[in-house]
Image (cartoon, rainbow, N blue to C red):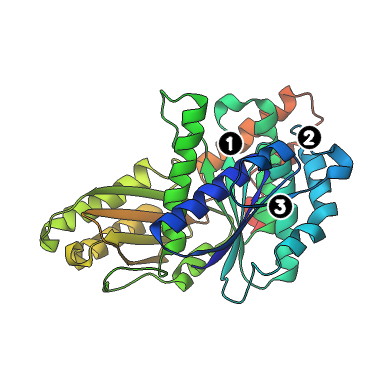
């Protein structure tokens, strides 16, 4: 799927760069343009992609200090400037725009939903948010910001592809190692998803194309992505169990939002050497995803790729009613109270997420 990436805030910029580099190194050519936007000059200086500094009149290039309301105001005031800098990037070739942001900080959590709103006002193509939830160790301000930002992002976006920071962080990681692991995991999983149907080696029996990704995400609300891989036999008939095993691992052990399996729709992509892919295994795995999610709208297909491994990429869409989301919104509400905010309980309630789709 041909996309344009816009990273908002510190985390958004770093993840956007990781995605663009992964796509370039793999030769997929799915990323057709990338821009990083921030109110903090220092966070843009080490990025190797085009950048836009916003809010200079308000914060003098020093960022918003975690104030996501100020971040939203600055983006609203700067939206025209950002969109002007997208001229020539969002072309008729692009099939979607992906706005990337950490939902816990200031510029990203406040600014990303505002930018999505402006993009949807102008463009007819889908506009998705790739949102990253802060980890449990990142403090109450970040948790409270993320709760507010998530609800706004769901309302404004065609879908929010959600990544829980704690999902892919190793227990022994340092802070720097943890963020690198998360960024690499996002780049690999989202990069493979975007590349589906763009650059393939060999001919698969049922190759996934962009329309299947778009139709899966059309459920709206919150989506999540999982991935797992294993060594494959040269004989396709011996890989039936391998395909079902990596599918189970991708969905039960490696989702970007853990413990969220009930879904409105799903997409299963099996990647690997076409000569090693078992049609029986792919169909069996797809039926398992159907049973596990309770969805009758499960799409599936191949991603031919020169590799001795077989990998499964699982996308679940419409998972905002999951226990994990409920738990996170409750945590955000308690964090807001601990910050001394006069909080409307409904601001952090997940009961009305259905109505935001």
Q: Secondary structure at mark 2?
A: loop
Circle nearer the viewer, 2 or 3: 2
Q: Earlier in the sequence, mark 2 or mark 1?
A: 2
Secondary structure state at the residue bearing disc 3: helix
Q: Which mark is residue 328?
A: 1
Number of other residues with Cα within 10 Å of mark 1, as a class: few under 14, some 14 to 19, many 20 or more: many
For residue 113, above or below residue 89: above
Q: Is residue 320 visible?
A: no
Residue at image position (34%, 71%) is 207
Quadrant of the rendered structure where residue 195 is?
bottom left
Q: Earlier in the sequence, mark 3 or mark 1?
A: 3
- Residue 289 visible in the picture: yes
Mark 3 Cα shell of 10 Å, populated few (<14), some (14-19), many (≥20): many
Q: Quadrant of residue 92?
A: bottom right
- Seen in the picture, residue 250 relative to 84 is either above or below; the reply is above
Counting from the top left corner in percent of width and height, residue 50 is at 65, 54
Label 2 vs 3, first from the N-terminus: 2
Residue holding disc 3:
113
| Rendered-image quadrant of the C terminus | bottom right
Q: Mark 2, mark 1: which one is toward the viewer?
A: 2
**Horizontal arrangement in the rendering, residue 35 relative to residue 70 (left or right):** left
From the image, state whether disc 3 or disc 1 is nearer to you.
Answer: 3
**Which of these two is toward me, 125 or 191?**
191
Q: CA distance from mark 3 to mark 1?
A: 19 Å
Q: Which percent across, then down, holds residue 346?
A: 73, 41
Q: For mark 1, give the secondary structure.
A: helix
Tell me the CA gap for discs 2 and 3: 21 Å
Q: Which mark is residue 62?
A: 2
User: Above or below — where is 103 with respect to 22?
Assistant: above
**Contact? badges 2 and 3 (CB < 8 Å):** no
């Amino acid at each position: 799927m041909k996309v344009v990436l816009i990273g908002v805030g510190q985390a958004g910029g770093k993840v956007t760069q990781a995605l663009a580099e992964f796509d370039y190194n793999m030769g997929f050519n799915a990323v057709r343009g990338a821009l990083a936007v921030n109110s903090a000059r220092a966070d843009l200086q080490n990025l190797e992609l085009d950048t836009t500094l916003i809010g200079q009149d308000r914060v003098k290039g020093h960022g918003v200090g975690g104030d996501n309301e100020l971040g939203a105001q600055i983006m609203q005031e700067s939206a025209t400037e950002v969109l002007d800098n997208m001229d020539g990037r969002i072309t008729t070739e692009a099939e979607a725009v992906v706005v990337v942001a950490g939902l816990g900080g200031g510029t990203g959590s406040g600014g990303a939903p505002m930018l999505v709103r402006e993009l949807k006002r102008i463009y007819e193509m889908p506009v998705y948010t790739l949102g990253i939830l802060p980890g449990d160790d990142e403090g109450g301000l970040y948790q409270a910001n993320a709760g507010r930002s998530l609800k706004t992002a769901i309302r404004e976006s065609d879908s929010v592809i959600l990544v829980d920071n704690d999902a892919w962080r190793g227990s022994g990681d340092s802070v720097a190692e943890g963020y690198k692991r998360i960024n690499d995991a996002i780049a690999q999983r989202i990069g493979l998803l975007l590349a589906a149907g763009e650059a393939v080696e060999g001919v698969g029996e049922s190759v996934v194309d962009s329309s299947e990704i778009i139709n899966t995400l059309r459920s709206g609300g919150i989506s999540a992505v999982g991935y797992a891989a294993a060594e494959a036999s040269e004989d396709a008939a011996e890989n039936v169990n391998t395909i079902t095993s990596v599918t189970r691992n991708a969905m039960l052990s490696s989702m970007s939002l853990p413990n969220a399996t009930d879904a409105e729709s799903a997409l299963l992509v099996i990647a690997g050497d076409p000569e090693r892919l078992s049609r029986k295994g792919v169909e069996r795995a797809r039926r398992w995803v159907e049973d596990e999610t309770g969805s009758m709208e499960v799409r599936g297909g191949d991603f031919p790729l020169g590799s001795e491994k077989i990998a499964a990429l699982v996308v679940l869409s419409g998972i905002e009613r999951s226990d994990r989301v409920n738990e996170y919104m409750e945590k955000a509400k308690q964090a807001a109270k601990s910050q001394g905010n006069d909080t409307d309980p409904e601001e952090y309630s997940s009961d009305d997420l259905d109505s935001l789709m």
